């Protein structure tokens, strides 16, 4: 088995013929990624955001459509994909959260494999493909969510990579479909993905551009129309329109990095560690390579070169969107594919300048160093905080009557771990969602508070230090705090007898 250097792999039709055969390096890359991620384990901390998608997945497995079980501003596939994992877990008799996390591990592995194919095909070099795959593999943030999900942006990365790969081979229907799938997972990716595809189309198609553009549109419309039609058929079209479009357009409040540059840098370092520099170098490299490919005048621009320019457009638009709205380090995932491609481009550029064994040795040294460091990070950051969360939920439920009623306020985690159903579809109230509640619930947020008081759920899980204004009087009058678990506070109704409340405090080991 040999590794082709950047200058020995043929171009044009010969490449396409060769790529019809299975590339064994794809399997090697995926196997390495799988082992690396498995070392991270599946028992990591279940945060609020991850709990949202895990709870949504459980509801989908119960037969509840996305958005109907829980209000959320991400796309419906952010609910449906974890639901597939939960459904499969039930079918084979394993824990549902483990099933969801395992599915997202496989999605992460597939993303690394597609990155290899993308780098190889754009730069016509297996070495470049390996360099690009190592760049995505070593992203600390990507490692974190590979096994500690489910997180919608992991699936979005895979869809964006597939769209870029389809664009490279000018499969416009396929590219449009993957752009739509990515958008139905996390809406902001649409701007970056469509910009990249259109730029690649305009530069790489010599004749029949209108037809290619039509194919791109048709590919995107098919999954979109299926989704809209399905919601209309089940009578929840307005729910879909509200969660997918209206809340984001009218209510969502975004944070701009320009307002808090120091804070943004701090959270990026926290999320990506040393791999942040790989991301930065790759992003700059793909921009330089894209500009070079765009200004190079040839009688016929290769589709792969046009796709490279498209990848540059993707990262530019992704960066501009991030300047407008950036809520945490996972938002940078939209730029990871192009940045990884940039690292592969550096390998290819070095190979053109210094062809031969030197390039092979240095490229493989980068791949080996990045992989080794990532294995160390993956194994070294493995934690078991989920065990404590599970134990707390099990202890609370063991002391209460069967099937207690529960209200989650920014705290879906106990619902997931206890296989419980929230009192309503409202769980999140930040970044404009409380304003949406104000406008859509009878009597607004105060009416929602009265509704909660009337139903007197047995438990209230509060995932923030201070309760919202509509909840504070309810807690003061009818609830007592009995403990704190990693990520949320427990409140139990005064309808529960004092002995049980004291037992709950003892079980949660909380001195109140």
Image (spheres, rainbow, N blue to C red):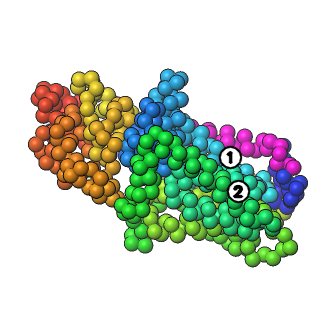
Q: Main secondary structure of the magenta part?
A: helix
> In the visual, does 325 lie left or right of 351?
left
One can see residue 25 in this view: yes
| Foreground of the two, 308 or 368 | 308
Is residue 25 on the magenta stretch?
Answer: yes
Is residue 55 on the magenta stretch?
Answer: no
| Foreground of the two, 54 or 138 | 54
Which quarter of the picture shows residue 254? bottom left
Which quarter of the picture shows residue 179? bottom right
SS type, badge 2: helix
- Residue segment shown in magenta: 17-41
Q: Position of residue 47 (x, y in %)?
A: 39, 45
Dot placed on the residue nearer the N-terminal end, 2 or 1: 1
> In the visual, does 446 lie left or right of 301?
left
Q: Residue at horizontal 51%, vertical 53%?
A: 186
Looking at the image, residue 377 lies above or below residue 207: above
Q: Residue at horizontal 57%, vertical 45%?
A: 226
**Exactly how many numbered labels are in the figure?**
2
Which quadrant is home to the C terminus? top left
Q: Position of residue 82 (x, y in %)?
A: 50, 39
Q: Residue at horizontal 49%, vertical 41%?
A: 233
Which quadrant is home to the N terminus? top right
Q: Residues within 10 Å of mark 2 (few under 14, many from 20)?
A: some
Q: CA distance from mark 2 to mark 1?
A: 26 Å
What residue sits right under mark 1 in the picture? 113
Q: Position of residue 97 (x, y in %)?
A: 45, 34
What residue sits right under mark 2 in the picture? 215
Q: Position of residue 399 (x, y in %)?
A: 23, 25
């Amino acid at each position: 088995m040999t590794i082709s250097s950047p200058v020995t792999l043929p171009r044009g039709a010969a490449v396409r013929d060769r790529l019809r055969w299975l590339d064994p390096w794809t399997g090697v890359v995926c196997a390495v990624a799988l082992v690396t991620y498995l070392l991270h384990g599946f028992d990591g901390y279940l945060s609020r955001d991850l709990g949202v998608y895990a709870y949504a997945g459980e509801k989908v497995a119960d037969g509840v459509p996305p958005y109907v079980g829980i209000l959320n501003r991400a796309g419906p596939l952010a609910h449906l994909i974890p639901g597939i994992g939960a459904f499969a877990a039930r079918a084979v008799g394993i824990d549902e959260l483990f099933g969801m996390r395992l599915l997202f591990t496989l999605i992460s592995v597939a993303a690394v494999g597609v990155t290899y194919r993308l780098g190889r095909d754009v730069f016509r070099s297996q070495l470049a493909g390996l360099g690009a795959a190592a760049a995505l593999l070593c992203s600390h943030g990507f490692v974190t969510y590979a096994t500690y999900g489910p997180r919608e942006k992991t699936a979005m990365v895979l869809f964006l990579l597939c769209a870029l790969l389809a664009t490279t081979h000018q499969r416009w229907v396929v590219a449009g479909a993957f752009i739509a799938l990515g958008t139905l997972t996390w809406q902001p990716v649409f701007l970056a993905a469509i910009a990249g595809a259109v730029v690649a189309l305009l530069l790489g198609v010599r004749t029949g551009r209108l037809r290619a553009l039509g194919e791109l549109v048709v590919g995107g419309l098919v999954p979109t129309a299926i989704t809209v039609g399905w919601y209309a058929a089940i009578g929840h079209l307005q729910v879909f329109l509200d969660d997918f479009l209206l809340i984001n357009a009218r209510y969502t409040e975004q944070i701009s990095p320009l307002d808090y540059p120091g804070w943004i840098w701090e959270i990026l370092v926290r999320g990506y560690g040393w791999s942040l520099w790989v991301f930065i170098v790759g992003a700059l490299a793909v921009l330089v390579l894209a500009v070079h490919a765009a200004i190079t005048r040839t009688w016929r621009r290769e589709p792969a070169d046009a796709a490279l320019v498209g990848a540059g457009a993707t990262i530019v638009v992704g960066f501009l969107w991030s300047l407008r709205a950036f809520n945490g380090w996972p938002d940078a995932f939209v730029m990871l594919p192009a940045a990884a491609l940039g690292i592969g481009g550096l390998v290819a550029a070095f190979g053109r300048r210094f062809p031969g064994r030197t390039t092979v040795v240095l490229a493989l040294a980068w791949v080996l160093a990045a992989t080794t460091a990532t294995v160390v990070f993956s194994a070294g950051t493995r934690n078991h905080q989920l065990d404590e969360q599970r134990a707390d939920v099990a202890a609370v439920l063991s002391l209460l009557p069967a099937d207690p009623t529960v209200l989650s306020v920014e705290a879906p985690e106990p619902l997931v771990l206890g296989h419980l159903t929230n009192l309503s579809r409202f769980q999140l109230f930040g970044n404009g969602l409380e304003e949406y509640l104000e406008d859509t619930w009878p009597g607004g947020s105060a009416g929602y508070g009265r509704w909660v008081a009337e139903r007197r759920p047995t438990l209230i899980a509060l995932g923030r230090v201070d309760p919202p204004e509509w909840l504070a009087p309810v807690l003061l009058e009818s609830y007592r705090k009995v403990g704190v678990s990693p990520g949320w506070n427990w409140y139990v109704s005064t309808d529960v007898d004092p002995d049980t409340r004291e037992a709950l405090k003892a079980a949660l080991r909380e001195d109140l």
